[in-house]
Image (spheres, coloured by chain):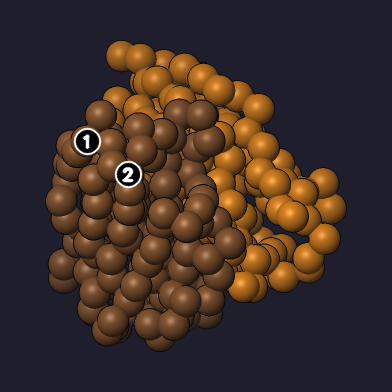
Chain colours: A orange, B brown
């Protein structure tokens, strides 16, 4: 079974600074997909970024980028120029080809003014 | 375009009562997922459908839970009888085939007294 581990329950960062959230996963599959979702206090789950395992190039989306290390089974999220609106829970998620998605326990990020 | 719609947003009921949660996926999406989120267990996949057919219900906690998808635009998750430990936020999500990301609804916060 696939597992997703987020080892940082809570993190904080100063506004405009950069922060990196960690995620590791365990799988025996070769084809899969990785995601970072954001859950603000509104409770809405919002997709931040996704990565296909077959792609070597790291995904980027504006201020958000990932460091995907397939051999190490690591998928970290970097947020540059942090903004107050980035304050939220961040979930790392793994999805296999059977659409079975597993989420990590989440990292609570607080951006301080 | 409207996103995934869930109703009700909040539900408070008493132990032993039947509870029905409703979901309308994004038009054209062929996958529909039901998740449960609790502090103790995080986000768990309960069941998912492809083209209205249940594919994997291994996450459904017990026989008190059932889900249906009578057509492409509507799904229900029913709990009968409800118990206090069922209190959680229930999310519905939909996606468009392949490896596309899942779009989440706003969730239903269920409280069973």
**Front-most of residues B45 and A102:** B45
**Circle 1 sits on which residue?**
B14
Distance between mark 2 and mark 1 Cα atoms: 8 Å
Percent x, y for residue B33? 42, 64
Residue drawn where x is 25% and y is 29% of the image = B113
* Helix, strand or loop for disc 2: loop
Image position of A66 (left or right of B91): right
Task: Using the rendered view, name the quadrant where residue A84 is placed.
Answer: top left
Say which chain tag 1 marks: B
Percent x, y for residue A13? 46, 18
Placement of the N terminus of chain B among the 4 image quadrants: bottom left
**Circle 2 sits on which residue?**
B82
Asked if badge 2 and badge 1 are on a common chain, one would say: yes
Image position of A7 (left or right of B16): right
Percent x, y for residue B26? 26, 72
Which sits earlier in the primary sequence, circle 2 or circle 1?
1
**Front-most of residues A112 and A17:** A112
Percent x, y for residue B91? 34, 52
**Front-most of residues B12 and A93:** B12
How crowded pointer 2 is (Cα within 10 Å; few <14, some 14-19, many 20+) is rated as: many
- Look at the image and tell me whether residue A51 can be seen: no
């Amino acid at each position: 079974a696939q597992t997703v581990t987020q080892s940082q329950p809570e993190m904080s960062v100063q506004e405009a600074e950069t922060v990196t959230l960690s995620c590791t996963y365990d799988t025996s599959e070769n084809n899969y997909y990785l995601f970072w979702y954001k859950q603000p206090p509104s409770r809405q789950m919002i997709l931040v970024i996704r990565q296909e395992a077959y792609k070597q190039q790291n995904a980027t989306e504006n201020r958000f980028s990932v460091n995907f290390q397939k051999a190490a089974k690591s998928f970290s999220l970097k947020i540059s120029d942090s903004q107050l609106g980035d304050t939220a829970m961040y979930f790392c998620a793994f999805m296999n080809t059977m659409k079975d998605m597993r989420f990590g326990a989440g990292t609570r990020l607080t951006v301080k003014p | 375009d409207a996103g995934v719609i869930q109703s009700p947003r909040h539900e408070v009921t008493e132990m032993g009562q039947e509870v029905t949660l409703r979901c309308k996926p994004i038009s054209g999406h062929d996958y529909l997922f039901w998740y449960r989120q609790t502090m103790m267990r995080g986000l768990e996949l309960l069941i998912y459908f492809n083209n209205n057919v249940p594919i994997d219900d291994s996450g459904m906690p017990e026989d008190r839970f059932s889900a249906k998808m009578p057509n492409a635009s509507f799904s229900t998750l029913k709990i009968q009888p409800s118990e206090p430990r069922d209190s959680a936020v229930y999310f519905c999500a939909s996606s468009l085939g392949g490896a596309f990301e899942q779009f989440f609804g706003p969730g239903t916060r269920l409280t069973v007294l």
